[in-house]
């Protein structure tokens, strides 16, 4: 009987809310709305218990995860150690720089060979030269591209295509 | 991946620790190589750096030889300058990865006879001192007042002012005038190999000019035909022509802080023309002097000074005049009567 009355009451309140203007609805919401933990806090406060028991239990786990390990210490270097460290980094930089320059040199040789080939072709045959100079409009992956494998295929290259 | 990450983190650490260890580094007077055998990676690094240095030195020597051949056989000026640049770049590259060189550069020890130190000195000048100088010059209006900033641009040489045996001053600082009582020690780092003749001028921008109730320029010191090059950076006054002998700064009492600018001007024909006789007076304007003789500003710096008791001695001993004192006109006190007592404005007292 009491339950039916509560339900009826709830339906009535819901209907009333729809009839009210939006402004009044908003004001009503501000006055009566509660957060998720508010009911718990109210209950605990009414019982006279401590507030930390009502806080989110995830806080404890977060604190545990964050502070269970000691924060790592940066290694302490003397000035000599620091000098050695910087020298090592500089030598590594030099190695990388040399490798870069070597690769660039190789690229330049290849490019110059290409240029010379084009110049030679221009002198030999104009039609073929013009055909070689054509730039493809729709640049996509070459059709002949294959996934690199550990061992060669049975048929290395299909010359008929 | 782990080692790479550690390496990067140590890189950051290296910079932090460098700041902490800078005090220790400054206390050393010469570079001491760290001990080998402690860190094996360091020993390998030394081998790599030595191999690189040997390779680049050989290339630099080859470039030097080709340059010498071009100079002897009489090649075109462009070709020679190109070869010279190539040699210079290789000479710098061969030594710039050396720990000792970098330590010396960081601690301000530059042996300007070596190309690597010339390069590092210029780099150090462009990094911050030039910016500070330009900021101070423009902030204190030295540049629009003294010379056209569009013509000066950024000075290509580094002018260092030192006084009474101390190290060179920061441009624009306020100094005690007694410090500049003796001739200033001027250093001009010109970043070019050949010797060029320069004119050195010290100007007070804020000398009071009572006639027009304003301030005007006054020359304190003019010396011409001073040779400067990469190897000779300190001013040898005895080698130059002193057209106006040095007068120490004398900011009068009651005047605002005076700006004293020292300007190094390159003489015409790339510093080859001599200026032995010139009409200069203390009341000239620098713009006129520059226009008359076709000079080019290559270095500039300045400092500021205000009056204190030591300035009076300059007036009495050097200028032979009583020290002036500027200030507002004394206003008669209308509340005091002829008997020296306060005038009673109330009748029945």
Image: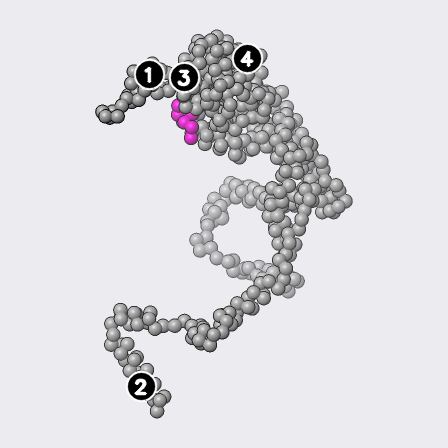
Whether residue B57 is situated above or below residue B75 in the rendered picture: below
Whether residue B303 is situated above or below residue B312 in the rendered picture: below
Residue on which the image places disc 1: B212
- Considering depth in this image, is B231 or B310 the residue closer to the camera? B310
Dots 4 and 3 on the same chain: yes
The answer for how far apart the CA atoms under marks 1 and 3 are is 17 Å
Q: Chain of mark 1?
A: B
Task: Specify which label sits upstream in the sequence, 4 or 1.
Answer: 1
Mark 4 lies on a secondary structure that is: loop
Residue on which the image places disc 2: A8
Counting from the top left corner in percent of width and height, residue B14 is at 62, 45
Task: Specify which label sits upstream in the sequence, 1 or 3.
Answer: 1
Residue on which the image places disc 4: B240
Main secondary structure found in the magenta portion: helix
**Callouts 1 and 3 close, C-beta under 8 Å:** no
Residue on which the image places disc 3: B325
Task: Specify which label sits upstream in the sequence, 4 or 3.
Answer: 4
The answer for how far apart the CA atoms under marks 2 and 3 are is 99 Å
* Residue A34 visible in image: yes
**Residue at (71% x, 36% y) in the render:** B32
Give the extent of the magenta segment: B139-145
Dots 2 and 3 on the same chain: no
């Amino acid at each position: 009987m009491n339950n039916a009355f509560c339900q009826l009451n709830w339906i009535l309140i819901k209907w009333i809310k729809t009839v009210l203007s939006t402004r009044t609805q908003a004001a009503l919401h501000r006055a009566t709305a509660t957060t998720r933990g508010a009911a718990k806090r109210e209950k605990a406060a009414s019982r006279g218990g401590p507030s930390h028991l009502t806080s989110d239990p995830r806080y404890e786990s977060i604190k545990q995860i964050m502070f269970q390990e000691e924060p790592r210490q940066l290694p302490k270097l003397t000035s000599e150690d620091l000098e050695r460290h910087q020298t090592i980094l500089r030598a590594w930089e030099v190695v990388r720089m040399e490798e870069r320059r070597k690769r660039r040199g190789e690229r330049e040789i290849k490019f110059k060979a290409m240029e010379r080939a084009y110049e030679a072709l221009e002198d030999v045959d104009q039609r073929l030269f013009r055909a070689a100079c054509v730039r493809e409009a729709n640049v996509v992956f070459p059709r002949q591209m294959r996934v690199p494998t550990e061992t060669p295929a049975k048929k290395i290259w299909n010359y008929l295509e | 991946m782990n080692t790479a990450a550690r390496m990067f983190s140590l890189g950051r650490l290296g910079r932090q620790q460098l700041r902490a260890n800078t005090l220790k580094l400054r206390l050393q007077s010469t570079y001491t190589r760290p001990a080998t055998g402690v860190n094996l990676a360091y020993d390998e690094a030394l081998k790599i750096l030595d191999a690189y240095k040997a390779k680049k030195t050989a290339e630099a020597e080859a470039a030097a030889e080709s340059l010498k051949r071009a100079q002897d056989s009489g090649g075109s000026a462009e070709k020679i300058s190109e070869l010279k640049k190539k040699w210079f770049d290789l000479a710098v590259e061969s030594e710039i990865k050396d720990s000792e060189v970098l330590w010396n550069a960081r601690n301000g020890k530059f042996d300007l006879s070596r190309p690597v130190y010339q390069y590092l000195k210029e780099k150090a000048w462009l990094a911050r001192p030039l910016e500070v100088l330009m900021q101070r010059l423009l902030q204190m209006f030295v540049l629009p007042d003294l010379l056209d900033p569009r013509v000066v641009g950024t000075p290509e040489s580094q002018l260092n002012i030192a006084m009474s045996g101390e190290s060179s001053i920061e441009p624009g600082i306020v100094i005690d005038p007694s410090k500049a009582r003796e001739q200033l020690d001027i250093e001009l780092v010109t970043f070019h190999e050949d010797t060029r003749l320069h004119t050195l001028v010290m100007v007070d921008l804020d000398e009071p000019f009572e006639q027009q109730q304003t301030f005007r320029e006054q020359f304190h010191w003019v010396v011409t035909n001073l040779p400067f090059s990469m190897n000779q950076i300190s001013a040898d006054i005895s080698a130059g022509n002193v057209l106006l002998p040095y007068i120490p700064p004398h900011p009068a009492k009651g005047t605002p802080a005076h700006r004293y600018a020292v300007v190094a001007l390159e003489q015409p024909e790339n510093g080859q023309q001599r200026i032995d006789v010139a009409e200069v007076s203390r009341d000239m304007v620098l713009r006129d002097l520059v226009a008359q003789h076709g000079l080019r500003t290559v270095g500039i710096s300045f400092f500021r000074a205000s009056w204190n008791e030591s300035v009076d001695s300059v007036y009495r001993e050097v200028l032979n005049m009583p020290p002036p004192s500027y200030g507002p006109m004394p206003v008669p006190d209308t509340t005091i009567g002829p008997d020296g007592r306060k005038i009673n404005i109330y009748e029945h007292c």
